[in-house]
């Protein structure tokens, strides 16, 4: 009886050890990294929701064609900024507007107005604070935020782009809009 109990304990401990090693090896090493949409799998994307009910209401605002957004750029400081020689804020604003146009449905009523904003960050590869080769691989990233009327962030996403001449920035902009507009659908599919 004692030998059987010892064997059972050893097997149980072995199983727990193997399970924890497997979990550690297969888990995503970067918390918040999004992979629920195909576009999020093609480039590094981080997504965070702070208020799912408000997100649904903000999505309704988009569907009712009542959206205004603000935008700005953050060019490199330590190296010569070249990204915005290839793409302008007006061009990226047009891409964001077109991405939202695909969700217009005029079927929603608004309880409050949400604030949509995004900015484009140019990766400053000569920044002395950058450590390692990985931090210099991407050209920049897009950060998209939605805030409520109290100016609190309810949703935020960041998507990298890689091309030095911003040829892939449109895909990153479309991805952040698609990610936001499908967020509650992802939650519904997990329950």
Image (cartoon, grey):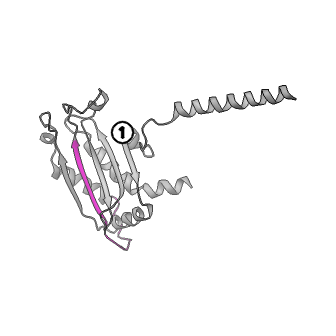
Hey, which quadrant is residue 17 in on the image?
A: top right
**Is residue 142 depicted above or below 133 in this figure?**
below
Examine the rendered structure and indicate whether residue 64 appears above or below residue 135: below
Tell which of 181 and 72 is nearer to you: 72
Nearer the observer, 103 or 1: 1
Q: Residue at x 35, y 53 (%)?
A: 156
Viewport quadrant of the C terminus: bottom right
Q: Nearer the viewer, residue 140 or 132?
A: 132
Horizontally, residue 186 falls left or right of residue 171, namely right
Q: Secondary structure at mark 1?
A: loop
- Classified by dominant secondary structure, the portion drawn in magenta counts as loop
Q: Which residue is mark 1?
A: 44
Picture coordinates of residue 101 (x, y %)? 30, 60
Whether 8 is among the magenta residues is no
Magenta residues span: 102-121
Q: Position of residue 178 (x, y in %)?
A: 37, 52
Quarter of the picture containing the N terminus is: top right
Above or below: residue 133 compared with residue 166: above
Say which residue appears at 50% left-offset and 55% top-offset. 187
Residue 103 is covered by the magenta coloring: yes
> Residue lying farthest right?
1
Q: Please give left or right for residue 127 compared with residue 40 in the image.
A: left
Badge 1: residue crowd in 10 Å (few <14, some 14–19, many ≥20): some
Count the numbered circles shown.
1
Left or right: 79, with 177 as reference point: left
Which residue corresponds to the image point at 31% horizontal and 55% vertical from the top-left?
145
On the image, the x and y values in percent for residue 133 come to 29, 26
């Amino acid at each position: 009886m004692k030998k059987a109990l010892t064997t059972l304990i050893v097997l149980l401990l072995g199983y727990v050890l193997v399970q924890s090693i497997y979990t550690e090896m297969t888990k995503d090493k970067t918390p918040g990294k999004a992979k629920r949409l195909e576009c999020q799998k093609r480039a590094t994307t981080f997504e965070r929701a702070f208020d799912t009910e408000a997100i649904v209401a903000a999505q309704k605002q988009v569907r009712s064609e009542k959206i205004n957004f603000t935008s700005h750029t953050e060019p490199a400081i330590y190296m010569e900024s070249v990204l915005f020689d290839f793409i302008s804020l007006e061009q990226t604003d047009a891409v964001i507007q077109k991405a939202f146009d695909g969700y217009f449905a005029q079927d929603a009523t608004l309880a409050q107005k949400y604030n949509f904003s995004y900015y484009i960050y140019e990766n400053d590869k000569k920044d002395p604070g950058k450590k390692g080769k990985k931090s210099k691989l991407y050209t920049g990233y897009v950060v998209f935020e939605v805030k409520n009327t109290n100016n609190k962030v309810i949703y935020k996403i960041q998507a990298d782009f890689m091309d030095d001449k911003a040829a892939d920035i449109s895909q990153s902009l479309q991805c952040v809009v698609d990610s936001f507009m499908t967020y509650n659908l992802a939650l519904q599919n997990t329950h």
